[in-house]
Amino acid sequence: DMKAFDPNSPSNNPNNLFGLPHTAEEANLVVIPVPWEVTVTGRSGTANAPKQVLMASHQVDLFDRNKPSLWEHGLSFDEFPTQLITLQVEAMKCIKNYRALTAQNKGTDDPQAAVLKKAINECCEQVNYWVKRRATNWLAADKIVATLGGDHSTCYGLVHALTEKYNDISVLQIDAHADLRVAYEGLTYSHASIMYNIMNLPQVKSLTAVGIRDFCQEEFKYIESCPEITCHYDQQIQDNISSGISWKSIVDTIVEGLGEHVYLSFDVDGLNPALCPNSGTPVPGGLEYEQALYLIEAAVSTGKKIIGFDISECGNDPWDGNVAARLLWRIFGIISPR
């Protein structure tokens, strides 16, 4: 109940993010939890991140200095997809056998491997379809929609849904990895292929990647040859800062390259790994927490509209959940009206 809610009291609604009283129908921002990590290649656990973030969110104080009545705008979890948990168990068996076969150098063309590959791709398609359906439903109700992964592939359905509403989308990616591999491991919807897949949506006009510091030669060539992609490599950013260039002027350059409608894809491993130590594939370096938020704030304050976002690859740990929950609250604060 909105009237009875006291933002200064301890959280007493364990089922909603930040203990807020809003239903998804009442909220401005609807967060779709996507507990899915079938294609992860590093440490597992990110499928449990939505629950870690939910638990950690109840420790977050709701006052925002810039927007004192922020909580009233309303933020809510969408329904928890229990069917994805069942689907994941099935897909995990397939991927285990698939990787065992490909490791024996049978390659992805081995008949048995091909059957498994098809099954895994179909499971991923089901997840994409489910996320897209949920997102479309909330976009039709005029909500801002975000996904909370799971691995980075979990945001595909949301971006796909947004392409039916906007025909000129700029993606702002904060990430340690380029994620531009073509069907990594033979899997179309691998977490390592998410940006390649997103760039193939015709309504996505540009990709601006920030913090990238772990990528292969094929991805580097793709970035170099693709005029729609601008990459602000982490090393380059840090070199500039060491040379006395301010983060503000670096951010101004980044933001200049964005279009009017921005989709924010935030893989937490884009941050300093002290902030996400249990992410699937942590890499030294990266952005600090306030640096990343300054960048998002700068995009909004120059008149760009953040049309949706994801927070992906959070680890299965209370600390990682705490960082992601606070990130979610701050992003909500940046994109909410005053």
Image: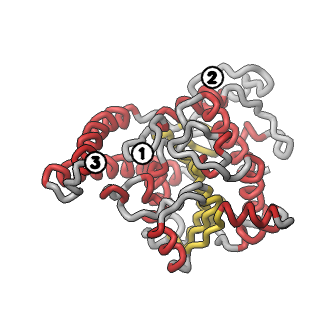
Please tell me which residue is depicted at 32% across the width and 32% down the height of the picture: 86
Q: Is residue 275 left or right of residue 250?
A: left
Q: How is the image coloured?
A: secondary structure
Q: Where residue 13 is drawn, which disc sits there?
A: 2
Place of residue 233 in the rendered image (x, y in percent of width and height, measured from the top left): 64, 65
Q: Is residue 164 visible?
A: no
Graded by Cα atoms within 10 Å as few (under 14), some (14 to 19) or many (20 or more), the crowding at tag 2 reads few
Location of residue 284 with respect to 214 vertically, above or below? above
Q: Nearer the viewer, residue 301 or 244?
A: 244
Please tell me which residue is depicted at 48% across the width and 42% down the height of the picture: 150
> Quick one: SS at disc 3?
helix
* Residue ranking furthest to the left: 111
* Residue ranking furthest to the front: 104
> Quick one: SS at disc 2?
loop
Select label 2 or label 1 by which is in front: 1
Graded by Cα atoms within 10 Å as few (under 14), some (14 to 19) or many (20 or more), the crowding at tag 1 reads many
Q: CA distance from mark 3 to mark 2?
A: 37 Å
Select label 3 or label 2 by which is in front: 3
Sooner in the amino-acid sequence: mark 3 or mark 1: 1
Q: Quadrant of residue 37?
A: top left
